[in-house]
Amino acid sequence: MKIWHRLSFPPAAESTLQKLGLQYKRDYRLNDPNAVLSVFMTIDESNPAWLAVSELGGGETEVYTEFSSEEVLSAEWLIVDSHHSIGYPLPRGTSWSTEYYELGCKSCGVNWRQITPYRVSPKTRMGKYAFASFWGGFQLFCSSGVLEKFESEGIRGYDTWPLRLTQAKQSLPDVRQLIIGTVAAPAIVEETAETKYFAKHSCSEHGGNWYNYYRRGMLPMWRNALHQGVDFQLTNEWFGNGRTARREILVSNRVAQLVFRNQWKGLYLSPVQLID
């Protein structure tokens, strides 16, 4: 695996970055192409210059882990997320509408529940992608071809909902939402998890907990907390930022193998570390 950091620095850091032989980009002041506001770059922790860069005190905008194909295909369970969007549900501007959701905690968002299929424009298309979500979403949509393969391979643990068209009692053809009903037992091994970017938060409103998304390495989980008779399940724990908490979707190795074998596009697959 490679752990990547996106960093920004004041212009004075350019000379140091140049001495280290690193590539970076400049951010210029609006309407003044000669005034550098900051410089920014992406670097992974295996780079020999990482220690020197980390000591420059730059602002970190993102950290994420890139897993190898071997790590993905050897993992028993993986967190799955879409990196392709098909837009927004309709009507626009109704984020967290009670038309679609039974809302959870007003403070942290935990315990919301989708109660009905989304409505979308007839122009909505998956394109070359087999999986998708909405912009910034937590949903997981897939093509009919994916579902046919799931059925023939005996993939278990999911249901599907249609995407309704706005002006007719019809559904968007060839696209379905995957609905996951199985929820794992509490599984995070907190004493093993990294603590620089990952933390538990307690909600003063409803007394429950939620966590940061796990971005550095593999999320450690107790093996016996996960159901073994399914290929899809949700984490018991909620993850997110403030009011947008969600449960992560876990998929089995069988699903990961199908994604690679069929070269399906539209997914991130992040292995979890199972601990006995």
Image: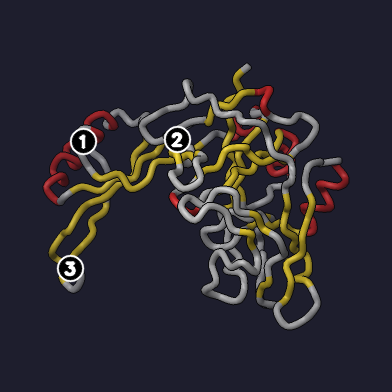
User: Which residue is drawn at the image coordinates 59% and 49% (left, top)?
Assistant: 111
Work out whether 44 lies above or below 74.
below
Instruction: Report the amino acid beneath label 1.
Output: Leu
* Number of other residues with Cα within 10 Å of mark 2, as a class: few under 14, some 14 to 19, many 20 or more: few
Q: Is residue 20 left or right of residue 274?
A: left
Residue under numbered circle 1: 20
Instruction: Name the N-terminal-most of marks 3 and 1.
Output: 1
Mark in the foreground, 3 or 2: 2
* Residue 265 placement (x, y as % from top left): 64, 52
Give the position of the C terminus as an image quadrant: top right
Work out whether 264 lies above or below 95.
above
Q: CA distance from mark 1 to mark 2?
A: 37 Å
Instruction: Name the N-terminal-most of marks 3 and 2.
Output: 3
Q: CA distance from mark 3 to mark 1?
A: 25 Å
Contact, CB < 8 Å: mark 1 with mark 2? no
* Number of other residues with Cα within 10 Å of mark 3, as a class: few under 14, some 14 to 19, many 20 or more: few
Work out whether 69 lies above or below 173.
above
Q: Is residue 124 left or right of residue 31?
A: right
User: Which residue is drawn at the image coordinates 25% and 34% (left, top)?
Assistant: 54
Instruction: Name the N-terminal-most of marks 1 and 2.
Output: 1
Q: Secondary structure at mark 3?
A: strand
* Residue 39 placement (x, y as % from top left): 22, 52
* Number of other residues with Cα within 10 Å of mark 1, as a class: few under 14, some 14 to 19, many 20 or more: some
Residue under numbered circle 2: 200
Instruction: Report the amino acid beneath label 3.
Output: Pro
Residue under numbered circle 3: 33
Instruction: Report the amino acid beneath label 2.
Output: Lys
User: Which residue is drawn at the image coordinates 18% and 42% (left, top)?
Assistant: 18
Work out whether 93 lies above or below 108.
below
| Residue 99, quarter of picture | bottom right
